[in-house]
Image: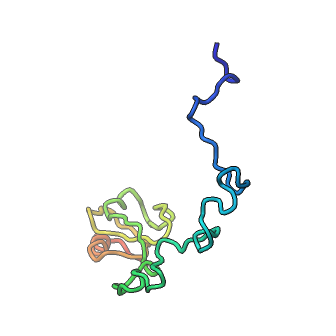
Amino acid sequence: MLQLNDLQPQDGSKKRKRRVGRGTSSGWGKTCGRGHKGQKSRSGGTKGLRFEGGQTPLYRRLPKRGFKNYPFKKEYSVINVSDLNQYDGEVNKEMLKVAGLLKILGTGEIKKALTVKADKFSESAKKKIEAAGGKCLT
């Protein structure tokens, strides 16, 4: 019967790690298969993928294009006017459970007079909320 303590890997499936620098009789002594002297014989002796022999690398030769706005970009959580119908009285971020900036868009219809507090309103949303008798507060 096969037991856990009897398990062994199949013959030839496990290869031993080459141990270099353990004397000349091992075949991997002295220079340990690295040849003689030079940068590649040293530990850590490579310049990296982007190194081009001292020539100005490609990523520095090419012109930088465009404007990167990511440090200044504002991300808004979007809510439509039709979603506000389920609330009464005053609506704010805490009621909508929104973290960060809140923007109200004008998709759908609003049937109640609500006071809505948000960071930004679209023009159509503002018109619909005020037409229903509500207020838009920023």
Left or right? Give the position of 122 relative to 4: left
Residue 44 picture quarter:
bottom right
- Give the answer, above or below, for where 91 lies relative to 38: above
Residue at the extreme top of the image, as rendered: 1
Question: Quick one: 13 or 69, which is closer to the camera?
Answer: 13
Q: Quadrant of the N terminus?
A: top right
Question: Quick one: 118 or 87, which is closer to the camera?
Answer: 118
Residue 134 at x, y percent in the picture:
35, 71
Residue at the extreme right of the image, as rendered: 23
Residue 61 picture quarter:
bottom left
Residue at left offset 68%, top offset 22%: 6
Q: Quadrant of the C terminus?
A: bottom left
Residue at left offset 46%, top offset 75%: 50
Count of residue discs = 0
Residue at left offset 26%, top offset 73%: 124
Residue 112 picture quarter:
bottom left
Left or right? Give the position of 126 relative to 39: left
Left or right? Give the position of 133 relative to 118: left
Residue 84 at x, y percent in the picture:
37, 61
Residue 98 at x, y percent in the picture:
47, 64
Residue at left offset 37%, top offset 66%: 78
Left or right? Give the position of 97 relative to 38: left
Question: Quick one: 119 or 43, which is closer to the camera?
Answer: 43
Residue 20 at x, y percent in the picture:
67, 55
Q: How is the image coloured?
A: rainbow
